[in-house]
Structure formats: C-alpha cells, structure tokens
Image (cartoon, rainbow, N blue to C red):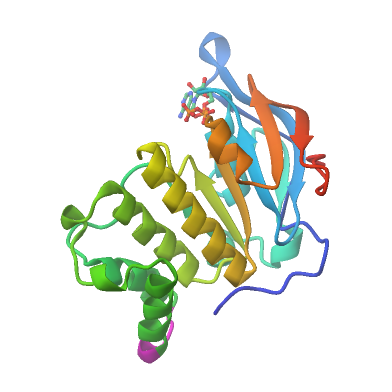
Amino acid sequence: MGAVAPAVGVPLVRCENAARTYGRGPAAVVAVHSVTCSVPPGARVCVVGPSGSGKSTLLHLMAGLDRPTTGRVSHPGLGGEDARGLARHIGVVFQGPSLLPPLTAAENVALPLRIDGVPGDEVASRTRAALRSLDLEPLAGRLPDDLSAGQAQRVAVARVLARGPALVLADEPTGQLDRATGRQVLTVLLTAAAELGAAVLVTTHDPLVARALDIRWYMADGRLVQPEARPEREGDPR
Ligand SMILES: Nc1ncnc2c1ncn2[C@@H]1O[C@H](COP(=O)(O)OP(=O)(O)OP(=O)(O)O)[C@@H](O)[C@H]1O
C-alpha cells in the first residue's frame, strides 16, 4: 500500500516546545503548554489524561490539522511537510461518527483512495483488503445507519488504514463505545496497524485502553508529565 518507509529512528512527528492557545486576552485558554515529544516509526504510544488536559489539541497539532501558537511541529520521517503530503501518511481516527451517511461501508473506505487518484482496480483491492483485515467484509454493502457504533468505528479505522499511513493518530477511538466493543475496536486497530507497520498514537482517559499500548505519556493541564512506560520500551516523550 502507500506507506512511506521512513529511515529507522527518524521521528514521524516531532513537537518542539509546541504550545497552543485558543482565543486572546482574558478569554485565552492555553490548551497545550510547550510540549516536546516525538513518535518514532512503528511506536505504539498512548496519551493518557483527564478530559480537558489537552490530548485532542496535541493530536491535532501532530496531525497537521492545527498549528502551534508557538514552538514547532515537524514530520522529519514523513518527507513532505505540506498538508496534502501529510494527509497521505497520517491517518486520523476521530471519537465520534465520521462516516459519510449516503455511502456504503466499502464506498466510505474507497473514497479517500479515489481522491488520492489511486487507479480503480487498486482502489477495489485495497478496499477489500482493509475491510478483510478488520473483519468487515460481510458489512461492505451496509450504509452507516445500519451499522452498530462499534462496526462504524471499525469502518472508520479501515478507511484510515486503506491509505497505508505510516502514522495513525486515534483520538479517543473507543470513547463512545461500551467497554467490550471498545476493546475489540482497539485490538483490531492495533493488529491492522501492526500488519501495516504503522506507528499508532491513541489518546484516552481510560487506563484499560492505555494498558494495551507499549508507551504511555501522561497529560495534565496541557503538559506532558512524567511518563510511565513498560520496561521494554523507552517512555521518554523526547
Ligand atoms: N476550539 C477551542 N476553543 C477554545 N478552547 C478550546 C478549544 N478546543 C479545546 N479547548 C480547550 O482547551 C483545553 C484542552 O482541550 P482538549 O480538547 O485538547 O482536551 P482533551 O484532553 O482532549 O479533552 P477531552 O478528552 O474532553 O476531549 C480545554 O480547556 C478545552 O476547553
């Protein structure tokens, strides 16, 4: 598929003293204070923190969907710095429903590939492969309204993975699912991303979700605080 092959160890995304303030003057909200961190190829990172701690803002900065007010966010392992280039290499999974209602599951997965200009037969094969890897083949012809929340989220994951991203950023991907469904979605997300060799960064406030990832960064009041990592993986966000 279309994943780039970044040089080993070169971070896919690097934040250097990146900060984001919403609004101005007395109404200003500092959502992220001067964060420095990076995600290397193939890493599985979780950003854990309570609601309002700045997780989504940090993820949007990393995705190139937003720009830091001060500091810098770069993507040295992904080659292109322009938004279109980044969009090909970074897949974003959002918390809520994100499928286009008039399109079937398969059409939702295929659409970004068509927009990318992928040839028709390759669109079909990549769509099939992505649906298969998430056990969604029987649901390919269903409209989003006829899918459960967990099924719809798996289709959203398939849509991201079909493009072959080097980095998947998932913003509370299980936040609107019951625990069992959430665990299933997370498992298929991590398995399919591993098959692709993609790095994954998941935000969550759920310690159970956090435990499924190798590296955990903790966020509080817009800052990354002392990370806790499993012994086998380096947990320093820098
Ligand atoms: N567009 C915005 N305008 C103003 N303030 C915002 C905006 N987006 C987020 N904020 C504020 O920035 C802070 C961080 O929000 P953010 O959504 O990044 O946190 P979060 O940890 O992802 O929370 P949640 O888990 O509830 O999504 C919060 O105080 C929030 O109210």
Q: Nearer the viewer, residue 222 or 125?
A: 125
Residue under the point 54% across and 40% down: 209
Q: Which residues are magenta?
A: 117-121
**On screen, 225 above or below 152?**
above
Kindly indicate the quadrant of the structure image that contains residue 158: bottom left
Q: Is residue 120 above or below residue 64?
A: below
Residue that appears at 54% across and 79% down: 1
Q: How many marks?
A: 0
For the stretch drawn in magenta, the main secondary structure is: loop
* Residue found at x 49% / y 50%: 186
Q: Position of residue 201 (x, y in %)?
A: 61, 48
**Could you say which quadrant of the image residue 4 lies in?**
bottom right
Which residue, as the protein is rendered here, is positioned at the far front?
180
Nearer to us in this view, 135 or 146:
135
Query: Residue at (59%, 71%) from the top-left corner?
Result: 196
Q: How far from the left and from the top, in percent, is residue 44?
A: 66, 52
Quarter that holds the C terminus: top right
Inspect this view and state whether residue 151 appears: yes
Relative side of 154 to 90, left or right: left
Q: Is residue 225 left or right of residue 88?
A: right
Q: Quadrant of residue 195?
A: bottom right
Q: Is residue 146 left or right of residue 119?
A: left
